[in-house]
Image (cartoon, grey):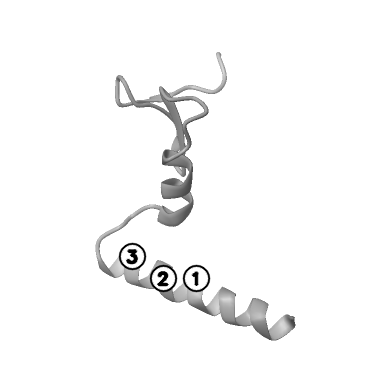
Amino acid sequence: MRGEADAMSHTVTELLTVARRMGSNLTDPFMTLSFMALSVIPSLKLTDRGLLDVERFELVPLFIA
């Protein structure tokens, strides 16, 4: 089991390296992609930069000052 986890970790690291070489500046582009496809809340999407209002294409503040 440990070997499989190590192999998966290595594969994910390689994928992130390739994504960065291709120009992605996201912390974890694959996590962002997985949340962008959720249909639970169609107008809001979770990204690595925060909560995004996809209708206005703006980040939503999480805390009111």
Query: Which residue is situated farthest in the top direction here?
Result: 65
Q: Name the residue under label 2.
A: 15
In the orientation shown, which residue stands out farthest toward the right? 1
Amino acid beneath label 2: Leu
The x, y position of residue 54, in whole percent, is 34, 26
In the image, farthest residue toward the left: 22
Residue 45 higher or lower than 9, as above or below? above
- Crowd band around label 1 with a 10 angstrom C-alpha radius: few (<14), some (14–19), many (20+): few
CB atoms at circles 3 and 2 under 8 Å apart? yes
Mark 3 highlights which residue? 19
Quote the CA–CA distance across marks 3 and 1. 10 Å
Q: How many labels does the image show?
A: 3
Quarter of the figure with the N terminus: bottom right
Whether label 1 touches label 2, CB < 8 Å: yes
Disc nearer the start of the sequence (3/1): 1
User: Which residue is found at the position 33% from the left and 55% from the top?
Assistant: 25
Please identify the quarter of the rendering in which residue 36 is found. Answer: top left
Secondary structure under the numbered disc 1 in the rendered image = helix
